[in-house]
């Protein structure tokens, strides 16, 4: 069996909503452990290819997986890595009672996930700019 090269957009959107809502629920409830739900799911997705949030959401897809707009897996792993870093930073900040750190990281991941839901992927833009930088640098060195 070959590994898929893309993820249906609705599954990516569900993951983004879970990240965004976990941050909002954490802010409202003060229960920072909630950030661990998307953190663990995204880390599993990065390292094993199994994101339980996306796997659960896949049960609710109404069409064939290939009929949805695809999102590239490598790009999604990059985005998940950034989100995981921010979620872990938020958890650490709350755990050691550094609210400036906690809110800085959680605001970044909440804004990024909500903007992605609206249609602009900050992580995609960052990766594109990095690849452009690498390309321009390779031209100078050759």
Image: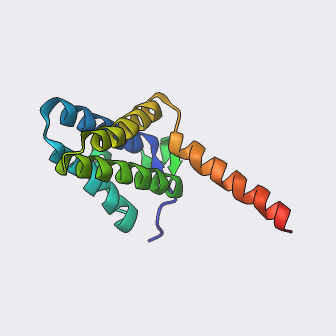
Tell me the quadrant of the picture where the N terminus can be found. bottom left
Please give the name of the residue rendered at 26% of the width and 57% of the height, measured from the top-left corner. 40
Please give the name of the residue rendered at 40% of the width and 38% of the height, measured from the top-left corner. 108
Looking at the picture, how far across and down is residue 110, in whole percent? 36, 35
Residue 69 horizontal side relative to residue 141, left or right: left
Task: Examine the image and state in which quarter residue 14 appears.
Answer: top left
Residue 55 horizontal side relative to residue 10, left or right: left
Report if residue 63 is visible in the image: no
Looking at the picture, how far across and down is residue 122, in whole percent? 52, 40
User: In the depicted view, which residue is nearer to us: 40 or 15?
Assistant: 40
Please give the name of the residue rendered at 67% of the width and 55% of the height, measured from the top-left corner. 131
Looking at the picture, how far across and down is residue 138, in whole percent? 78, 64
Residue 5 higher or lower than 89, as above or below: below
Task: Examine the image and state in which quarter residue 63 appears.
Answer: top left
User: In the depicted view, which residue is nearer to us: 5 or 79?
Assistant: 79
Residue 53 horizontal side relative to residue 6, left or right: left
**Count of marks placed on residues:** 0
User: In the depicted view, which residue is nearer to us: 51 or 29?
Assistant: 29
User: In the depicted view, which residue is nearer to us: 58 or 102?
Assistant: 102
Please give the name of the residue rendered at 48% of the width and 61% of the height, measured from the top-left corner. 4
Tell me the quadrant of the picture where the C terminus can be found. bottom right
- Say how the picture is coloured: rainbow
Report if residue 21 is visible in the image: yes
Looking at the picture, how far across and down is residue 32, in whole percent? 17, 44
């Amino acid at each position: 069996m070959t590994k898929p090269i893309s993820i249906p957009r609705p599954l990516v959107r569900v993951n983004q909503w879970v990240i965004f809502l976990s941050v909002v629920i954490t802010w409202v409830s003060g229960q920072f452990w909630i950030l661990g739900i998307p953190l663990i799911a995204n880390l599993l997705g990065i390292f094993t290819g199994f994101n339980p949030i996306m796997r659960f959401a896949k049960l609710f897809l109404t069409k064939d997986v290939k009929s949805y707009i695809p999102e590239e897996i490598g790009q999604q792993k990059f985005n998940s890595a950034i989100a995981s870093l921010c979620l872990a930073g938020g958890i650490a900040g709350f755990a050691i009672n550094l609210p400036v750190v906690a809110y800085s990281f959680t605001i970044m991941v909440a804004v990024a996930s909500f903007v992605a839901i609206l249609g602009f992927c900050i992580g995609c833009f960052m990766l594109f700019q990095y690849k452009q930088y690498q390309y321009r640098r390779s031209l100078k060195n050759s």
